[in-house]
Amino acid sequence: MSYYQGLQAEVVPFRGHNGDQGEAYYARPTRAGKFPGVVVIHHIPGWCEWTTEVARKLAHHGYAAIAPHLYFREGKPGEAPDDLGARVRAAGGVADAQVMGDVAGAMAHLRAQPNATGKIGVIGFCSGGRHTYLAACTLKGIDAAVDCWGGNVIVDNPKDLNDKRPVAPIDLTEKMSCPLLGIFGNDDGNPTADQVNRTEAVLKKLGKNYEFHRYDGAGHAFFDWRRDGYRPSQASDGWRRVFDFFGRHLAASASSVAAE
Amino acid sequence: MCSYILEKAALVGSAKGRKGWMRIDTANVYFDHPYHSTLDHVLAIDFTNEGEGGRDRVAVELSADSARALVDRILAALASGEAAHVTVPAAAAATR
């Protein structure tokens, strides 16, 4: 058997919040066997190419990964995701309840596949990191969650809460029902190092299963190779942490490829 | 993390986008993580026609420094242009 295994990636329909049909990017290994699933939650700018790369990376490491397009309601299939992102931004963003419904729908899509083990992880970046924290606290059936630099988990100004984002995720921490991995850059402005410390204090106080990894010399989105803020050394270690975490909580035998 | 902080400016004008020229009535302006630029943060402007649904846009992503420089150049162009054009008809009329 070759060291590297094949994968298949495509855009698939899925049922999201309220049963609405949207589209998602779905990547999974092609070899025989059963695989744990991971939902990938994109950042505010939208369903970008890098998000699809993350899904393929997960598939490369033995996971069936699905990245739902959280803004599909704003346009038609085939429209540029960045344009849909602009419409969402102009409308004040998407509602947390809708995103949670879409994530739950993506999880159901993964579980319905014949090659699913039934184990489900969630990983999100930026606003998707915040959504991941929310999902870990509000959705049932998540086995592991990875919050990559999700900001606004702590909301210091109550005026920042509104109909779409009515509750600060930190206030739901008691309900967190799965292990949480947090990846943060110490130079990030949102979340700041202080906010990360305060989040950790709440998790610790409530006895939650969590691990946080903080990186010096890194700011926001330091995994993204397209950005000037990309930090290859920190990103490499961060990905190693992600696959170690998913390996322990989702599938000790899923990965056939070492994290690089 | 990204934010949804947004400034809206009402506009009268036109912009050329994917489908050609269109009338625009709004600029959505924000400073946040970009979609295309490699910068960590950009000053982004989406020129749209919200009166017609705001579905099409002309988008720019600019560095903070270049956005400030653009503001200066816009004001400079308005000052010199209005001085040249707005007052010309009156001056021209006086010489006739």
Image (cartoon, coloured by chain):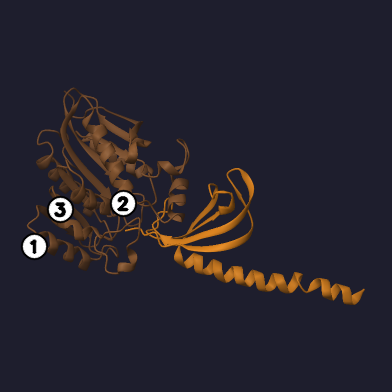
Chain colours: A brown, B orange
Residue bearing the label numbered 3: A175
Circle 3: residue type: Lys
Circle 1: residue type: Lys
Q: What residue is shown at x 69% (from left), y 72% (from top)?
A: B80
Q: Secondary structure at mark 3?
A: helix
Q: What residue is shown at x 26% (from left), y 52% (from top)?
A: A129
In which quadrant is the N terminus of chain A drawn?
Answer: top left
Chain where mark 1 sits: A
Residue bearing the label numbered 2: A96
Provide residue A89's location: percent of width, then percent of height: 43, 54
Provide residue A169's location: percent of width, then percent of height: 23, 57
Are marks 1 and 2 in one subunit? yes
Label 3 vs label 1: CA separation?
A: 13 Å
Residue A73 falls in which quadrant of the image? top left
Label 1 close to label 2 by CB (< 8 Å): no
Left or right: residue B78 compared with residue A178: right
Label 1 vs label 2: CA separation?
A: 25 Å
Q: Earlier in the sequence, mark 1 or mark 2?
A: 2
Are marks 3 and 1 in one subunit? yes
Residue in the foreground of this view, choosing between B58 and A15: A15
Residue in the foreground of this view, choosing between A222 and A260: A222
In which quadrant is the C terminus of chain A drawn?
Answer: top left
Provide residue A247's location: percent of width, then percent of height: 12, 40
Chain where mark 3 sits: A
